Image: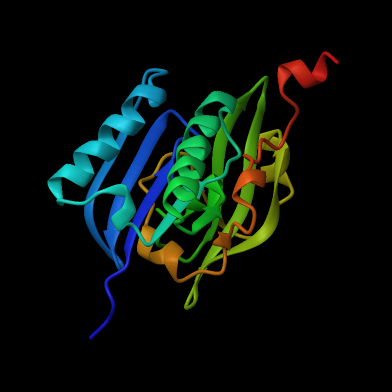
């Protein structure tokens, strides 16, 4: 009989907050909704709701998966801090995945996938992915650039995905998940300097 693995998945990189609770690849509870700059309040609240509905506690988790960015500076910190806290306090393995990959996972077609997160000032966080028999794969490295310029460099058919509920089973079988070896060294991938760093 297959061992039951309880996983908590968090992504707070965009205005859409995602929290998912999984038993192996089966979703047993989720929250996916646009927030109003209230991820810091919503995240813990929705995690508690999911745990209570499934009669679970944090220490019952076998694994935590967190979207590492790129995306909103404040939003990213919230998700990563919670993952670090849960992982460290309960000795639970933490894995990271690109927030762009999570968006890309929502598309199930055969075209190249161009996930996009608005980075303001005319730029976007972009990457290029594709669906394969082995799950989602990264085709071209993620970068901060102008969407139209990036599109003009593509020669194959693609699908732009800006919003989409993550397909976690597809992510679980991919090679995009990375185990965090040093939980204290876990930091978001901002793909750009913060305002404070630019002003140094």
Image coordinates of residue 25 in percent, x first then y, are 31, 67
Horizontally, residue 53 falls left or right of residue 192, namely left
Horizontally, residue 194 falls left or right of residue 104, namely right
Determine if residue 155 is in view: no
Pick the residue in front: 163 or 21: 21
Residue placed furthest toward the right = 200
Determine if residue 194 is in view: yes
Image coordinates of residue 94 in percent, x first then y, are 50, 55
Image coordinates of residue 71 in percent, x first then y, are 57, 34
- Asked if residue 124 is positioned above or below residue 63 in the image, the reply reads above
Point 38% across, 34% down: residue: 17
- Asked if residue 156 is positioned above or below residue 66 in the image, the reply reads below
Residue placed furthest toward the top = 199
Point 21% across, 44% down: residue: 50
Question: Which corner quadrant holds the N terminus?
Answer: bottom left
- Asked if residue 181 is positioned above or below residue 117 in the image, the reply reads below
Pick the residue in front: 138 or 78: 78
Point 57% across, 61% down: residue: 179
Which of the 4 image quadrants contains residue 164? top left
Image coordinates of residue 77 in percent, x first then y, are 55, 31
Question: Which corner quadrant holds the C terminus?
Answer: top right
Point 52% across, 57% down: residue: 95
Q: How is the image coloured?
A: rainbow
Horizontally, residue 111 falls left or right of residue 25, namely right
Pick the residue in front: 12 or 16: 12
Labels in figure, total: 0
């Amino acid at each position: 009989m297959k061992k039951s693995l309880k996983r908590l998945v968090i992504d707070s990189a965009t205005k859409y907050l995602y929290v998912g609770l999984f038993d192996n690849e089966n979703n047993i509870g989720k929250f996916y909704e646009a927030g109003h700059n209230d991820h810091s309040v919503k995240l813990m609240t929705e995690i508690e709701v999911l745990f209570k509905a499934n009669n679970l506690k944090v220490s019952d988790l076998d694994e935590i998966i967190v979207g590492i960015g790129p995306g909103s500076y404040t939003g990213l910190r919230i998700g990563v801090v919670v993952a670090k806290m849960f992982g460290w306090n309960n000795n639970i393995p933490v894995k990271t995945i690109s927030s762009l990959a999570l968006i890309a996972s929502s598309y199930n077609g055969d075209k190249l996938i161009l996930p996009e997160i608005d980075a303001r000032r005319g730029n976007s966080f972009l990457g290029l992915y594709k669906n394969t028999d082995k799950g989602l794969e990264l085709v071209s490295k993620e970068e901060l650039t102008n969407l139209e310029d990036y599109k003009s460099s593509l020669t194959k058919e693609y699908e732009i995905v800006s919003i989409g509920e993550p397909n976690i089973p597809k992510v679980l079988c991919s090679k995009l998940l990375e185990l965090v070896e040093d939980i204290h060294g876990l930091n978001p991938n901002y793909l750009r300097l913060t305002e404070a760093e630019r002003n140094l």
